Image (tube, rainbow, N blue to C red):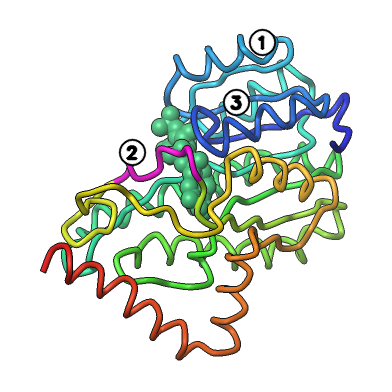
Amino acid sequence: MPDFGGKTVIVTGASTGIGRATAAAFRESGARVIVAARSSEDLKRLSVELGGPDRVLPVTTDVADPAQCQALIERTVEHFGGIDVLVNNAGMVVSGKFEYLQSGDIERLFNVNFFGVIYCTRAALPYLKESEGVIVNVSSIAGFVGTATTSAYAASKAALNSLGQSLRVELKPYGIGVSTVCPYFTSGVELAKKGILREGTLHRVDGPRRRAPGTQTTEEVAHAIVRAAERRSRLVVLSPAGRLIWRANRLFPWLTDYVMDKLINGRLREQIG
Ligand SMILES: NC(=O)c1ccc[n+]([C@@H]2O[C@H](COP(=O)([O-])OP(=O)(O)OC[C@H]3O[C@@H](n4cnc5c(N)ncnc54)[C@H](OP(=O)(O)O)[C@@H]3O)[C@@H](O)[C@H]2O)c1
């Protein structure tokens, strides 16, 4: 486990799933952690579980609101004196056939998955310069491999991948590291439950949900995020299955199109006509 003793880490989207596990993993590595999300009660419970507000401070934040992101950063600096790591993890899903998505859904999605990262990063920048800190953006394999029914989500993550690449170069002279971590399917998360699901989404199909081969646990993803922050990794694509799909899409894009058509369109036809 990397040593983040004495460091201050902000994790957005820490009320559930990957963010919650990431807050616990950073705490385990000795960091002081600020946990941010909209669900205040979940954050308070997490803070108590991980040692109380002197170690884990809950700050209720909607990352889609720039003023709340600014307040999150100010509260962190006031409480812990600075920022060493910013983990932009908060995210939501909008799923459904493109023809049924509404413009407002897509705007909401971008406000959280993309602009939320912009607002938190911009507000944290002066303090990250001071500490020569690290930004870790939690993206997704979907940012590299677009699939049917997740067009808006995939586009938001592709934008995030691109942002990370530019910031990595631009912020290098300040000693700030920028990592992009792309999880594959992860178990134990609320992503679809809290998202906007329109007609023609695989999340809505009846029957037991099939778990994709190579699905990881939130703890596995959390440890990869902590390692990425320690090593200042440029890009981390998670799980052997995720890396296989990512590479196959670069080398044989026609093959991924074919497989996605068979898997996703076939399954949608079978389930919803
Ligand atoms: N699960 C997967 O298979 C998977 C795969 C690849 C990438 N990812 C990415 O991993 C990240 C974490 O997702 P997860 O899988 O752990 O799902 P999750 O359990 O739904 O967690 C999402 C977190 O984001 C927070 N959030 C949502 N909207 C927010 C807002 N407007 N302001 C602040 N916080 C907000 C949620 O908390 P509140 O509702 O309390 O605000 C929650 O804590 C996301 O960026 C997701 O895109 C997930």
Q: Give the residue type that dot 2 points to.
A: Lys
Q: Secondary structure at mark 2?
A: loop
| Tag 1 secondary structure | loop
Q: Are marks 1 and 3 in contact (CB under 8 Å)?
A: no
Q: Magenta includes 192?
A: yes
Which of the 4 quarters of the picture holds residue 133? top right
Q: Is residue 146 above or below residue 93?
A: below
According to the picture, the residue beneath numbered tag 2 turns out to be: 194
In this rendering, is residue 263 above or below 94?
below
Amino acid type at mark 3: Val
| Rendering coords of residue 66 (x, y %) | 48, 39
Comes first in the chain, label 3 or label 2: 3
Residue lying at 59% horizontally and 41% vertically, measured from the top left: 120
Q: Magenta stretch?
A: 187-195
Q: Looking at the image, is mark 1 or mark 2 nearer the viewer?
A: 2
Q: Seen in the image, is 1 located left or right of residue 59? A: right
> Would you call the spot at circle 1 few (<14 residues within 10 Å), some (14-19), or many (20 or more)?
some
Q: Which badge, 1 or 3, comes first in the chain's sequence?
A: 3
**Mark identifier at residue 35:** 3
Which numbered disc covers residue 255?
none
Q: Position of residue 49 (x, y in %)?
A: 62, 12
Q: Is mark 2 within 8 Å of ligand 1?
A: yes
